[in-house]
Image (spheres, coloured by chain):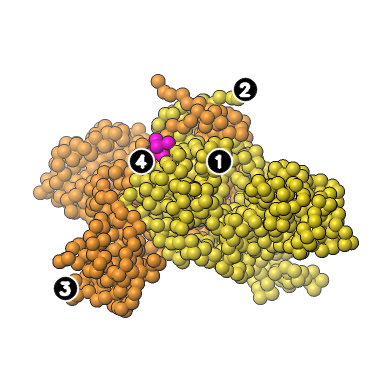
Chain colours: A orange, B yellow
Amino acid sequence: MKRTHHCAQLSKADLGATVSLAGWVDSVRDHGGIIFVDLRDREGITQVKFDSALREQAARLKDESVIGITGKVESRPEAMVNKNLPTGEIEVDATEVVVHNLSETPPFPLTDAGGDKVNEDMRLTYRYLDLRRPKMRKNLAVRHRATKSVRDYFDGQGFYEVETPALFKSTPEGAREYLVPSRIHAGQFYALSQSPQQFKQILMVAGVEKYFQIARCFRDEDLRADRQMEFTQIDVEVSFIDREGIYALFEGMLKKVWKDVLDHDLPTPFPRLAFKDAMNRYGVDKPDTRFAMELVDLSDTFKNSGFKVFQSTIANGGAVKAFNGKGLADVTQGEIGALEDIAKSLGAKGLAFIKVEKGEWKSPIVKFFSDAEKAELTQRLNLEDGDIAFFAAAPWERACAILGRIRLEAAQLLVKRGKLTLRADQWNFLWVVDFPLMSYDEERGGYAATHHPFTSPVPEDAALLDSDPKAVRGQHYDVVLNGMELGGGSIRIHQPDVQEKIFKDVLKIPADVVESRFGYMLRAFKFGAPPHGGIAFGLDRMVALLCGTTSIRDVIAFPKTQRAQDLMTQSPTSVTEKQLKDLHIQTVMPE
Amino acid sequence: MKRTHHCAQLSKADLGATVSLAGWVDSVRDHGGIIFVDLRDREGITQVKFDSALREQAARLKDESVIGITGKVESRPEAMVNKNLPTGEIEVDATEVVVHNLSETPPFPLTDAGGDKVNEDMRLTYRYLDLRRPKMRKNLAVRHRATKSVRDYFDGQGFYEVETPALFKSTPEGAREYLVPSRIHAGQFYALSQSPQQFKQILMVAGVEKYFQIARCFRDEDLRADRQMEFTQIDVEVSFIDREGIYALFEGMLKKVWKDVLDHDLPTPFPRLAFKDAMNRYGVDKPDTRFAMELVDLSDTFKNSGFKVFQSTIANGGAVKAFNGKGLADVTQGEIGALEDIAKSLGAKGLAFIKVEKGEWKSPIVKFFSDAEKAELTQRLNLEDGDIAFFAAAPWERACAILGRIRLEAAQLLVKRGKLTLRADQWNFLWVVDFPLMSYDEERGGYAATHHPFTSPVPEDAALLDSDPKAVRGQHYDVVLNGMELGGGSIRIHQPDVQEKIFKDVLKIPADVVESRFGYMLRAFKFGAPPHGGIAFGLDRMVALLCGTTSIRDVIAFPKTQRAQDLMTQSPTSVTEKQLKDLHIQTVMPE
């Protein structure tokens, strides 16, 4: 019995036709001795009527059984028409049925609501059932569509998709990696590639000019809701391009994906924000700009203040910052306590605030302020009745970080009160740029690359590399959406002498380590390396956003749990002694 | 300086325009004090003239240096026009030059011929240079185009591309796999997926109906010219489909790829050949049908022969087979010796033959034949002057295998003599079908699945599963091209009871092993598994054929050597004690 149509296809135009359908029993109903089966396939549902000799067979079908039927397309009786279903005006009167597979009763209802109620471990154990739920089926479809759209875009722009190895070389200094023991080379290991970074730069040296890859990457980090052991990134590298070129290229891609998948016109170009401005205004390098409540620097206001806490912080080179939690004066004592705990976890001594209620300022600190300071506060924070101002006094970066976090928490409290709406389909993309190239690691007493050591300095800062590495900005850029960093990249160094200087003089990596880790790259750069730059962008996260879900596990067909297990296949497992022996390793159990 | 054109773009239509190009110095020539640089990028070459103040700078440029230039498009003098180059009628008179990167002298010439002459280790060590050679650049482009074509095809057919995990569960009974130690679960391991077989079947149970994936797979086998540690396969699975459906689907894909990449119209449908017929006619299950020289079964002819070797083989249930090495009577003594060695390595006692030269039969065995036997031989083998017939007398399968191999060797000898042409662009695709489902492993004393244990029996043979498993044909199919197996697949078992019977009653896998390895699949099949089938097809091999190369290493950007090493990055390597400790393993060096 060969399928002639799928289950969302038949309409009144097909009346009288003999058709064959196949799919899953979505439900069975007995209406006065006639059996109605809602037959479901990937595309939709068609009602099938059994009122002949097949009635008995149909009555025994349990939900989720797989059948094929042949029958004639008929009009539904007026009362049974379902205007919400594409096939809602017809039904198929079955003349033949084949039962391919009888189903046991699923452990949870395969509806969107039914699956959302059970715990995720159950869904992952029975992933083949979980994926039958309408929203999970849609997520797979969206992932396919989005991925195809990305590929069509880069193909149209003249890019080659080039596959790079998953089995790479161990680079122990970076993020924790998965090792793969070699059978042929006893005692040696491959590492699973954390990203194609080095290979894609090598492809530029190879003259590929425009490379992309939808690349599987592996990172042995502790897993969180938005992390998986293996994840997929949109990986891009281009020769003879500058930052502006990358912005335009990637905005074009996102525009196409949003159009293809959501039929939404993403406005471009995206706003750009320097790292310093992002920190100053939002207290974070990945600001959520769907709401204001921007941070204000009050160091000028308080530099001669009678409030010694503020005054001395500023005198010691720190900053006093604040923002207006607009309309949140009704914050509860408990909520304030929770906010204070968060501030303390970020290094604050406490969380100073001023509530304005019925014209009155309620605050433990306001008594220290002069009238002029109060007037300036009111004006600069636009303080009105019902508002609450939060303060931080600390070294600049920490003051920013504390209030950046409190700002996000305050937004959540406003959302809870119905005073703020954060729409998941408001797409506030932006580029964050002009990051510092290096950060000084106090503990280690040396410089570390803010992103990675291949990032090229901003040309006008290059001269500072010797005198003041911290002041050098890198040609790095992050794509940020609604408070999430979705990807980032940079224009790279393509001159072997500059790259060597970064490794040896700035990062102080010993010469033998440079040689063993990066020697081949430095050599490659001596044979005609073009200027180049690129970007890496999280596909899983992008698809999750397109699907309106917060967990990337909902857009990965077979994810691992946060304990790094596959609950369906029961992995990882112990292996045989012979396998270990072949690989020249043995296990050492922790005490 | 921003690139305005690529290096294959400018023509007389652009005369007088000011343009900017960027790329590699392909060559530098000094013509009476004027410097000419052939500037090369991914697309082509443009001649750049330096006769101004830039002359000196240009003269210092070594080949493969990277520069950008700005200049005016001019006509070349009549004598310098190059009709073979798209840009051969123009040159650019440079007014500005930027030297991005000076190149050292490459260790080998970056021409097709230059690279072909050096050993492959050198090419792999300097892969970034090797990939600049025109044919390697073209291979990358073809791979991109072919992969895109495959994706477009399946997308157009309503398939979802679904990513499945690389980190899978160890299944030690199969091909040797790569293990990945778990940090979180001490003493436990993941295995790198050898193919998405189980996941794709689970996706069918999940209702995806039409799945495909261009999937990275990993196999720790000993490497040969056409094997890599990691390789890429076109992986497909469909629900509610039969063998005919798969054939049509996949022929459609190949037709599209050949059209898109080579502009070649592949005739479809492909011929089909039952396994038995393939063995009988070509002595192999992946016949090269670009030439005839088919095997003939002479058991009837010789069953009462006076030649005891033949007669007794047949009496013992074996077969006597032969083929006519058409026109190869001039085979040398040395060549015959080599053929005999091959036959012996396959279990033959020797290699009987009859040469026909000047009407005379020259053969050590012909004296045993009756006139009637000779007449029948002449007629059935179409023996003519200049021919040579090769014989094998052995159990049927071995007789087939011996002559199948000799047939291929004979073809090569004919090619060497210019008597046969085997064109690499003659695309003799065919399906080999009706394989036996099981083979009896004499050594182990039990049945083994010919392909894998998920293959469904041919319906009309299913009843023989209990009584005579060896006689059951599987619903398996291989795609064969010119003597190479490019892929294969099957209609799978979707009934849990049949699958369990295969595991336990036929393959005699212990119940606990079935549970730990396949328990989740058997469980999945109890919740509404649709009938389904699929295919897996080697992408690397396909692209190699499209590129006209015999080595898949030529179509993989960064392949490993046959010693499983990456010569460019120097992988694998030893790792630190800390890394091993984190993963709860230590190395054990072989004695």
Is the same chain shared between marks 2 and 3? no
Task: Residue B471: give x, y in percent of width and height.
Answer: 52, 51
Marks 1 and 2, how far apart at CA: 34 Å
Marks 3 and 1, how far apart at CA: 64 Å
State whether the magenta stretch is mostly helix, strand or loop. helix
Task: Report in which chain the residue with disc 3 lies.
Answer: A
Marks 4 and 3, how far apart at CA: 46 Å
Q: What's the magenta region?
A: B510-515
Q: Nearer the viewer, residue B413 or A148?
A: B413
Indicate whether A207 appears above or below B571: below
List the residue tagged with mark 2.
B591
Is the same chain shared between marks 1 and 2? yes
> Which kind of residue does numbered mark 3 sit on?
Ala
Task: Report in which chain the residue with disc 4 lies.
Answer: A
User: Which element is circle 1 on?
Assistant: strand
> Which kind of residue does numbered mark 4 sit on?
Leu
> Which kind of residue does numbered mark 2 sit on?
Glu
Q: Is residue A430 visible?
A: no
Residue drawn 66% across and 66% down? B8
Is the same chain shared between marks 4 and 3? yes
Left or right: where B400 falls relative to B412:
left
Q: Nearer the viewer, residue B459 or B517?
A: B459
Task: Residue A119: give x, y in percent of width and height.
Answer: 26, 44
List the residue tagged with mark 4.
A567
